[in-house]
Structures are given as C-alpha cells and as structure tokens.
Amino acid sequence: MSAPRGSGLARRLVQLYGGLVLYGVSAALQLRSGLGLSPWDVLNQGISRHTGMSIGTASIVVGAAVLLLWVPLRQRPGLGTVSNVLVIGLAVDATLALTPTPHSLWVRIPLMLFAVVLCGAATGLYIAPRFGPGPRDGLMTGLHRRTGRSVRLVRTCIEVLVLATGFALGGTVGVGTVLFAVGIGPLAQFFLRLFETPGTARAEQAEEPAREPAPERANVPERALPTEPVHECPDPV
C-alpha cells in the first residue's frame, strides 16, 4: 500500500531543506579547517574579504547573480533553486557563529575530511527530491545545452574561472580544494543513490502535471549530477 501523496511531499521537503542546511554546515566547517575551500567558496571568501559582508551573505549574493545568468539561457528555477540561494548562505553564517577556529593541525585535518564527506551527503540529500537544480548547477547545464559542449568541459571552465577569480581576491586554496575536487563527485553519486527513493520521479510528475516537456526541461538532467556533480558546498562559501 503506497503512502499518501502529502506524506511523500513532506518527506521530500525535509530532504531538500535538511540537505541544504547540512551543505551550509559543511562549507563552514571546511572554512574553519583553514586547509582550502571548494572553488565557489574560494570566490565567496574573496568577495567577503573585499566587501566586509559575511561569507554567507556573499554566497547569497553570488547565487542571486548566477540566477540572473539563467535568463538568457532560458532556464527556469524551481523551489530547490531559490532555496539553495538563501538557505545555504544562512546556514554558513549560523555555523560560523557557533563554531570556534581550531589551531591544532590534528583537529583541522579530520575537520576538513569530515566537511567534504558531509558535503557529499548533503548534496545527495538535497538533489534526491528533485525540486530543481542549484543556481550553479543550472548555469552549467544551461551552457551545456546552449553551446553543445560537454558537461565536463563546461563544468571545468566555470570552476577554473571561479577558482582563479577567488584566489586573486584572497580566497583560501589548499589541499582541501584538491580533496574536494577529487572526492565530491564520487561522494555525491554514492549518497544520491542512497537517498533517492523509488518513485520520486513519478511523484514529481504527478504533483506538477503542467511541467515543460522533457526536451525543454530546465531542471538538471536526471543522471547528469550523479555522474558529474558540481559543487555549490554551497556552492556554497
């Protein structure tokens, strides 16, 4: 006997917002480790240092700016897209306010490793409900669709540009940056398969019958992120 539709929607919302909060937490913990950030977080930190705004606020501003780039690409945001912009930045600032900066390398290394694994889990958790891609993921897939270039090439070009800009602004690049780049893809794929519940796609179609046909869908292709995920922990800071 299947569960009521309302309970299925509630479960998906819990997954979405739980994943986004944990994504922000993981980004803040990786920042606290001081051993290197993800490309987008390097940019957020660099912007924060030059503007005086918090890193979480910088993440929100960057996410909103990336969303504007969706307009010429004819991408359509979903609940998950807007929530991604707001929730991750707020979670980053809240976590930074509650956690001290460790000084011992014996604490910072495990903290960095835990943050990367947590980011992979959070990514799988918030993508699984299929409420729409994050702004950075949508930019990647939008450019892929418009230019005809491979997802891998588009993703690489975006992240190299973002990383170089963030580093020039004073963002932290280090072993954590490399570890994130190497590990986030396999981790996100593993956790997405773990958290994705059977029938999610069918439930999504049932709840949104007027959606755009598949060839023109604005959401991330169903298997694009598991195989080549991009990282917005969040992406995120």
Image: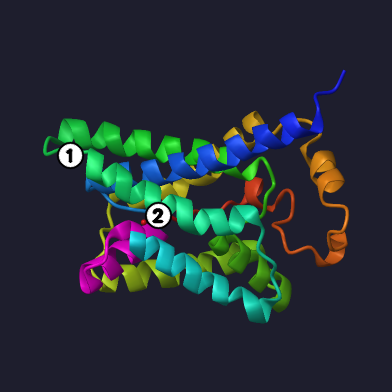
- Neighbour tally class for label 2: few under 14, some 14-19, many 20 plus, Cα within 10 Å: many
- Neighbour tally class for label 1: few under 14, some 14-19, many 20 plus, Cα within 10 Å: few
Q: Which of 175 and 169 is in front in this view?
A: 169
Magenta range:
40-56
Q: Is residue 228 above or below residue 112?
A: below
User: Mark 2 highlights which residue?
Assistant: 89
Screen quadrant of the C terminus:
bottom left
- Residue 158: x, y in percent? 50, 69
Q: In the picture provided, is 105 more to the left or to the right than 201? A: left
Q: Is residue 112 above or below residue 235?
A: above
- Residue 118: x, y in percent? 43, 36
Determine the residue positioned at 22% across, 73% down. 50
Residue 31, numbered label: none
Q: Which element carries disc 1, helix, strand or loop?
A: loop
Looking at the rendered structure, the kind of residue marked 2 is Gly
Q: Nearer the viewer, residue 199 or 10?
A: 10
Determine the residue positioned at 35% across, 52% down. 177
User: Mark 1 highlights which residue?
Assistant: 100
Q: In the picture provided, is 85 more to the left or to the right than 77? A: left
Of the image marks 2 and 1, the number of the one nearer the N terminus: 2
Looking at the rendered structure, the kind of residue marked 1 is Pro
Q: Which element carries disc 2, helix, strand or loop?
A: helix
Q: Nearer the viewer, residue 217 or 189?
A: 217
| Colouring method of the image | rainbow
Q: In the picture provided, is 181 more to the left or to the right than 176? A: right
- Residue 138: x, y in percent? 62, 63
Residue 45 part of the magenta-drawn span: yes
- Residue 119: x, y in percent? 45, 41
Determine the residue positioned at 80% across, 24% down. 3
Instruction: Characterize the magenta stretch by its predominant secondary structure.
Output: helix
